[in-house]
Amino acid sequence: MLIYIGDGFSTPILRAPCEANHIIKLRTCLTQPRAYGMFYIPTNERGNMSRAISVKVARTKVIDALTNKLQEMKLAKEAYEKADAQWEADVKQWREAISQIGFAHFDKVKNDDKEVSIRNWGYGSDKQTKVEITITLDNSLLPTEPTRPTDPFQSKGYGRNYIGGYDDRVAEILNAINLLRMSDEEVVSTSTYQHVARYL
């Protein structure tokens, strides 16, 4: 592989051989400090010139794959919502359990491990005072906090690689299916397939 040093428009100032597929600092590869930019030739694992792969996929197969993906996403969303609802119920029970443990150990906790906060403003009455008492307990006395399930449809990526949440993905897939069904082409080009493949 050759690394070219130049401004990208005029004749390169210098070119020097470097090992393929290795990121090498300029000073280890080149000796001249005059450099405006670095341009490299993509290579494969053997150091040969890499070539773009052109693949054409049958349009009907892509439509079927996208349709099946919609069904998979629907089932995954239902499973997540069920698991998330169970998590909320578990958290409620967990908080109640901690409250009971806190009351049970209140008299056993040293005063140094108690913090009192008193507030009597903002409640619309001068006859009430809000007293909050915080106690510190050893974690060994407390039940493990439930772990919330991960949303499989969190948005991710940026720019062209951005993938939205569930509703955005469904809308994109449905749009792609409708366009493919209206197409007269028997196969899908590589660029089109790459656009929809990120949802598969």
Image: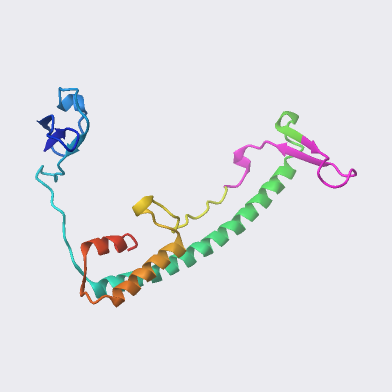
Please check the rendered image and state whether residue 65 is part of the magenta-colored stretch, yes or no.
no
Could you tell me how many numbered marks the image carries? 0
Please check the rendered image and state whether residue 131 is part of the magenta-colored stretch, yes or no.
yes
Question: The magenta stretch spans which residues?
Answer: 117-144
- Residue 183, given in percent of the width and then of the height, sits at 27, 75
- Residue 30, given in percent of the width and then of the height, sits at 15, 26
> Does 164 sit above or below residue 118?
below
Quarter that holds the C terminus: bottom left
Dividing the picture into quadrants, the one containing residue 4 is top left
Decide if residue 14 is on the left or right side of residue 38: left
Dividing the picture into quadrants, the one containing residue 140 is top right
Q: Residue at horizontal 80%, vertical 38%?
A: 119
Q: How is the image coloured?
A: rainbow
> Can you name the residue that lies furthest to the right here?
127
Q: Residue at horizontal 89%, vertical 43%?
A: 126
Q: Residue at horizontal 47%, vertical 54%?
A: 150
- In this rendering, does residue 33 appear at all? yes
- Residue 12, given in percent of the width and then of the height, sits at 13, 33
Q: Which is nearer the eye, 138 or 172? A: 172
Dividing the picture into quadrants, the one containing residue 25 is top left
- In this rendering, does residue 69 appear at all? no
Q: Residue at horizontal 24%, vertical 73%?
A: 59
Q: Which is nearer the eye, 37 or 25? A: 37
Quarter that holds the N terminus: top left
- Residue 141, given in percent of the width and then of the height, sits at 63, 42
Q: Which is nearer the eye, 81 or 51? A: 51
Q: Which is nearer the eye, 35 or 158? A: 35
> Does 81 sit above or below residue 36?
below
